[in-house]
Amino acid sequence: VPSIFEIVESVRLYQSKGQALLYRFVGVVDAEKSAQGSWVTGESGRRYLDLGGFGVFLLGHQHPGVIAKVSDQLSRLSCSSRWFPTAVGAEAAAMLVSIAPPGLSKVMFLNSGSEAAEAAAKLCRAATGRIPLCHIVGSYHGKTFGALSLTDNPNFRNGLGPLVAEVHQLPRDGAQEAGQRIRALRPAGVFIEPIQGEGGIVEVPIETLRQIRAACSEVGALMVVDEIQCGLGRTGDVWAISHADVQPDILLSGKSLGGGVLPVSALLATSAAFGPYDHNPLLHTSTFGGNPLACAAVVATVKAIVDEQIPQKAKELGGKFKAILEELHENYADLFIKVSGRGLMLGLHCVRPDIAANYMQNCAREGVLLTPCIAQPHVLRVSPSALTTADELDFCRGAVGRAASLTRSERMEMDKYAR
Ligand SMILES: Cc1ncc(COP(=O)(O)O)c(C=O)c1O
């Protein structure tokens, strides 16, 4: 096995110099070898409690039900000829619809979150015959051209324009104004994450969600709810939008949808909104979209979400994780500003981005992995598995506390020299 230094050097040579620099900068001293449940094992033999994973591991790593279903599928048919439909594809669609918000009865399987956002943007225009699209301050919907056009982060967009035309940004906190802008613009669709992930774990006010729904209905615009990160039970409800009692026209799912085993995303829609794809199945296609292996993962994931009461577990465990983070905030007000989020989609807001990076490194040293919010680097994401055990929670409490104490003493030491 190559050493971590050789692996990072290979990344520098053959992949990205910047990525290699980033690994060095955040002090990566291990490579990922295997994972099971809440734990990642490095090539060094060290184990890390994974509270990050960009929100993919709601069921943990290598969930036995998902692995069994996918392994069985792998032994028979992984990529299909696409000449015939597959039983597993039909089963995955029916199962996903069975847990979808009321009225969302159509599914299109794709591979990544960005691809689902792309398909949704096209669907909005095709279904309404209109051009304008709206998104919200702080949004993240992906990095392909369409999805990027609906993403509010200049760092991802600079130098890439012109992006998709007639995209407008709506306020997140001004519900009335958001509604008025929609009435004036009469857009094809409005994209919104009920809880913004990359944007810093920010809950969009319920009033904004409701005003957007009302205005969309009034002018015949489609409301696209992006639950790629917050959906499938992570926030304590199967769908985060149900918290606001709002029905979307289109809903996007991804990340945890493959059970932490395979990449897969989905666009769900009402049959009215889905019309163009219903009538013309070639309007949006993807060679690997809905491949049998991915569909097997979806079947097992939905089964686990229902049978293992994942939303309920996320709610209960979320309260416990939040209490750990609140205590951390209380004891280390010099490092942390606040805790945000719901269920197992939590954000630990640090006083500065460099402190967030420093703290994240120290957590890894103590055996806990967190993820930064890319667009808000002072916020660290805590998105654990809903199957985290009481012992793992205890381990987390000790490790994040030790990491905070280490970070505080390092900061004090550095501040001495800065003076
Ligand atoms: C809310 C949301 N939408 C879309 C995406 C894009 O998904 P992907 O990275 O799979 O393309 C992400 C990814 O972080 C996301 O969090």
Image: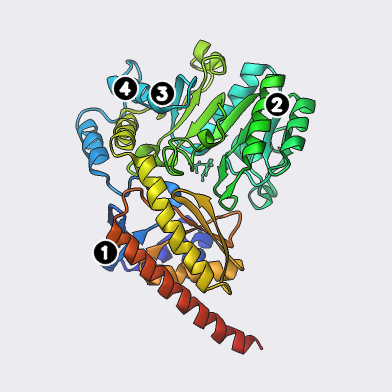
Residue 33 found in image quarter: bottom left
Sequence-earlier tag: 2 or 3: 3
Label 3 residue SS? helix
Q: For marks 3 and 1, give the one nearer the viewer.
A: 3
Instruction: Name the residue tied to disc 1.
Output: 1
Residue at (52, 19) in percent of width and height: 270
Query: Which sits earlier in the primary sequence, circle 4 or circle 2?
Result: 4
Q: Position of residue 287 (x, y in %)?
A: 42, 27
Q: CA distance from mark 3 to mark 1?
A: 44 Å
Q: Residue furthest top?
A: 279
Give, as a three-letter code, the residue at label 4: Glu
Give me the C-alpha separation between circle 4 and circle 3: 10 Å
| Residue marked by disc 4 | 91
- Residue 25 can be seen in this image: no
Quadrant for the C terminus, please.
Answer: bottom right
**In front: mark 4 or mark 3?**
3
Q: Mark 4: few, some, or many residues within 10 Å (few <14, many ≥20)?
A: some
> First in sequence: mark 1 or mark 2?
1
In the rendered image, the quadrant that contains the N terminus is bottom left
The secondary element bearing badge 4 is classed as: helix
Mark 1: which amino acid?
Answer: Val
Rendered image quadrant of residue 368:
bottom left
Q: Position of residue 297 (x, y in %)?
A: 31, 35
Mark 2 Cα-neighbour bin, 10 Å: few <14, some 14–19, many ≥20: many
Measure the alpha-carbon separation of dots 4 and 2. 35 Å
How much space separates mark 1 and mark 4, taking CA atoms? 41 Å
Q: Nearer the viewer, mark 1 or mark 2?
A: 2
Identify the residue position indicated by label 3 in the image. Answer: 97
Amino acid beneath label 2: Ala
Image point (45%, 24%), residue name: 108
Disc 1 within 8 angstroms of ligand 1 (CB): no
- Determine which of the numbered discs, if any, sits on residue 215 in the image: 2
